[in-house]
Amino acid sequence: MDQHLTIVNHPMVQHKLAYMRDENTSTNRFRQLLREISQLLAYEVTRNLDMTTKRVKTPMQEIDAPIVAGKKLALVSILRAGNGLLDGVLDLIPSARVGFVGLYRDEETLKPVKYYFKVPNKLDERLVIAVDPMLATGNSSVAAIDMLKEAGAKNIRFLCLLAAPEGVARMKEAHPDVPIITASLDDCLNEKGYILPGLGDAGDRMFGTK
């Protein structure tokens, strides 16, 4: 994964994303689609993991079977909307350790404000996958990655559902070593910092809030 930005163009990812964009999709259906699409995106974000082998005995013979090497992965949800992606990724990687970064966006300045931070230990020995559905201005994502690096993380990947060019540029400037995996690179941000065409506020649509 040497590219800074990977867009997952798999037909099932794009199909599910189309229904998530639809304003008529119910809260329940939106959550279900997000869980399903995050599993598919998880396949891409875990590509090229370090591997080793384990001696196993099949019903036929013993073999050296490939398994993932190193410490268990760390999944870090950027609250609150990150939890929607987290569930689907955990379906694929149930043994992963889980952390949370609590940030909210000041609607006046569009700057992130930290209110919670709890992550697994030994981040320097783990692949850390940070998840947040929307990479909009990039300010919250950059702040979250800053905190993860301060906590020792060295190998970080960022998984999101939608990205805006402005957010991708901001992340590349601040953290060029952190690859971004997304289902779509949308057109731009509006004056309020929302992604266009986007899908609205992911947290509100996921939890049924306004």
Image (tube, grey):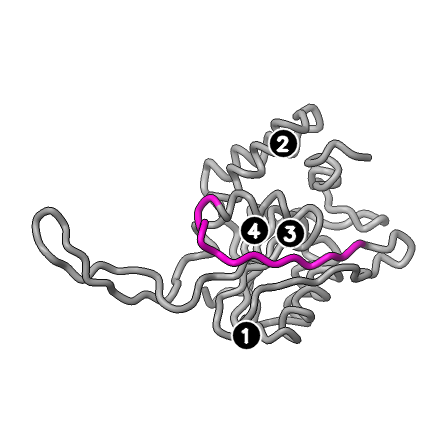
Above or below: residue 170 compared with residue 125: above
Circles 4, 3 touching at the beta carbon (< 8 Å): no
Circles 1, 3 touching at the beta carbon (< 8 Å): no
What distance separates the C-alpha of mark 1 from that of mark 2?
Answer: 33 Å
Q: Position of residue 56 (x, y in %)?
A: 18, 57
Please tell me which residue lies in front, 72 or 198: 72
Residue 197 horizontal side relative to residue 40, left or right: right
Tag of residue 132: 3
Q: Magenta residues?
A: 91-104
Residue annotated with mark 1: 154
Q: Earlier in the sequence, mark 1 or mark 2?
A: 2
Tag of residue 182: 4
- Dot 4 amino acid type: Thr
Circles 1, 2 touching at the beta carbon (< 8 Å): no
What distance separates the C-alpha of mark 1 from that of mark 3?
Answer: 19 Å
- Disc 1 on helix, strand or loop? loop
- Seen at 39% across and 62% down, the residue is 48
Of badges 4 and 1, the one in the foreground is 1
Residue annotated with mark 2: 30
- Disc 3 on helix, strand or loop? loop
Badge 2 density bin: few <14, some 14–19, many ≥20, Cα 10 Å: many
Q: Position of residue 82 (x, y in %)?
A: 65, 49
Q: Earlier in the sequence, mark 4 or mark 2?
A: 2
What distance separates the C-alpha of mark 4 from that of mark 2?
Answer: 17 Å
- Dot 1 amino acid type: Lys
Badge 1 density bin: few <14, some 14–19, many ≥20, Cα 10 Å: some
